[in-house]
Amino acid sequence: MRRATPIVLGIVVLVIAAACGGAPPPPPPQPNADSLAALEAERRAREQAARDSVERANREAEERIRRAREDSLAAVRRTTEEVRGMLAARINFDFDRSDIRPGDAQILDQKLGILNANPNLQIEIVGHCDERGSDEYNLALGNRRALAAKQYLVSRGIEAGRIATRSMGEEQPLDPASNESAWAQNRRDEFGVTAGGDVLMRPPGM
Amino acid sequence: MPLLGQDTIRPVEGVRVGITYTPGLRPGLLVLGGPRQELLDSVRAIVERDLDFSDRFEMITLPGSDSLMLALGTGSAARGPTGPFVNYALYEALGADYAVSVMDRSDSGLAVVVYDVKGRGARRVVPVTVTSVADRGFRMVVHRASDEVVRAAAGTPGIAATRLLVVQSGRVYRVDADGADVVALTPAGSGAFSATWAPDGRRVVYTEFTRGLGRLVVHDVVSGQREVVPPTTEFLNFAPAWSPDGRTLAFSRSNEEGTQVYAYNLAEHCCLQRLTAGRFSDNLSPTFSPDGRRIAFASTRAGSPQIYAMSADGTEQELFAPFDYGVTGSSYAPEWSPDGLHLAFHRDVAGSYQVFVMDVASRTVRQLTSAGRNEDPTWAPDGRHLAFVSSRTGTRQLWVMDMDTGRVRQLTRLDGTRLPSWSPRIPDLTNH
């Protein structure tokens, strides 16, 4: 508002000046202090308006860029989340087995694509067992289950150093119940990101 | 077995009740009553239970009021010329080969006296150096006396002065061999797993399991000191076993090479050695023979896990417990008996686990359990008692079986108990 005041004053001065037309020929304009001030105010107002429009344009441009960037960040975030979700998909095993089941090979192939599309990504595979096996043996079995998935990926070109393996044995069941469906769920490999997972690209064709 | 149909008295589990009794192969033993006094009563109760749990005697018990009549110094003559009157004839009629009395010898303290009924004389006086039930280590002192009573009557000491380690909810507990005094040895949340006693009865080693890594911790239960075994700070190290001289730890390690048996010289803090190899098989759960020269372990080299043995340096590997390929169930968790004669393990039978014992000399295997799921057997120092985890009552608890009589008793009331390890006889220095 403070800035508007000189503009309003300037307009008032101009209107008064215009209203004086039609009378006996006016004396040659004698610059007086008031009209000088009015001209100066007019000039300032024009400059200000120009500045304002440039600023507005700049602001709008920045806003557009910001929105675009946010949109693309959101997209990147969304993609990263989706890829993480795919990466986290578990695979399961038959009782006392550590071989990859045919249906689960697809899930591993998806991880293979993700690892290829994201060369900085490092993961860990954690093998788990159901409660039916021996407590100590299950640590070895969980280890073998994690190694089986790693072996699958490494044999298809993933650098071994990008994949860590661990075993939790039967110590961390997903479902603590003692029935077939709980056991089937608990015999599993879990996949987690250990490094390079902040921004993940979708593998081509997914 | 209790003679259920014969008596109106409710039988105590596994204890013969009634006086119409035919002596079996085991000597009959009668614990004599005595004056009602808190300390004497406590000692007598503990001794009687220890003798019963030794499974070496036919325990002769009488209903409460009758047992008082059997106290020394009652009956026809209150006191003989050389001490309390001992009614040998009556004890013999009751089927007793031995009578045991807990007495206060005033000046020289408490003692357990073992009378040889047929020989008509006191065989042994075992002092019990306690003054009050509140004494530090009171129960262990009495257990030691019980073991000496067993030695006097059976020629070989009992196993009352021993303890077992069990794991429950990620903590290691110790429990006395009679089920009393359950004490946590590790803090909550430390992920403790597979604990084992050292041959000195004073140290234990256990796995501290976190996020797929497992390090071995040696814990001195007397000083409270804990020490991580240096080479076990990486990878998953578990199922440790002490060599009989206490110098070497064998254990299983899981890493990218699978699971293999390693040995580490704890005494000299050196020389980590891998004893097994095989990229496509797992080798785990080592146990030393009592002479320290052989190690038995479980291996998947033939597919399903079975029991193998090797020299302590990893050479001369061989199949140990025979099995029929594709027929015999998977076998796990071997433990060599302290006398070297047997190897206990558990084996899959029809989708559940049962405890088996192999006679090492003949390599013949027999199944000891059949009710519920039974696993992870561990030997008492007498080489005839086994503790194992059983689900026979619905939850996993620790049970004890006497191989000679087949008698079974429940030791813990701690749901989810697992991975037991029986101690050697606890030496006096750990009397705490």
Image: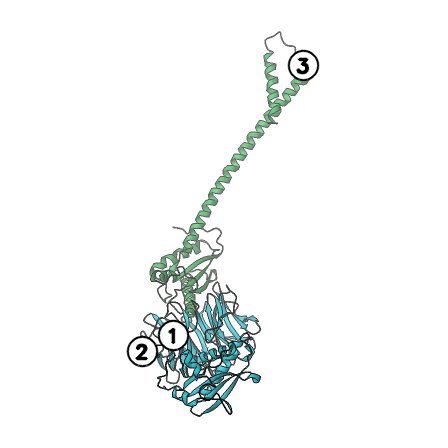
Chain colours: A green, B cyan
* Residue occupying the point 54% across, 34% down: A58
| Circles 3 and 1: CB atoms closer than 8 Å | no
Q: Amino acid at mark 2?
A: Gly
Query: Which type of secondary structure does the marked residue at label 2 adopt?
Result: helix
Query: Which type of secondary structure does the marked residue at label 3 adopt?
Result: loop
**Residue that badge 1 annotates:** B346
> Closer to the observer: label 2 or label 3?
2
Q: Residue furthest front?
A: B76
Q: Which quadrant, please, contains the N terminus of chain B?
A: bottom left
Q: Are marks 3 and 1 on the same chain?
A: no
> Closer to the observer: label 3 or label 1?
1
Q: CA distance from mark 2 to mark 3?
A: 141 Å
Q: Is residue A34 above or below residue B353?
A: above
| Circles 2 and 3: CB atoms closer than 8 Å | no
Q: Is residue B375 above or below residue A74?
A: below
Subunit bearing disc 1: B
Q: Are marks 1 and 2 on the same chain?
A: yes
Please report whichever mark, 1 or 2, sits nearer to the chain's N-terminal start.
2
**Residue that badge 3 annotates:** A30
Local packing at callout 3 (Cα closer than 10 Å; few below 14, some 14-19, many 20+) is few
| Circles 1 and 2: CB atoms closer than 8 Å | no
Subunit bearing disc 2: B
Left or right, A41 with reference to A126:
right
Q: Position of residue B372 (x, y in %)?
A: 35, 71
**Residue that badge 2 annotates:** B5
Q: Amino acid at mark 1?
A: His
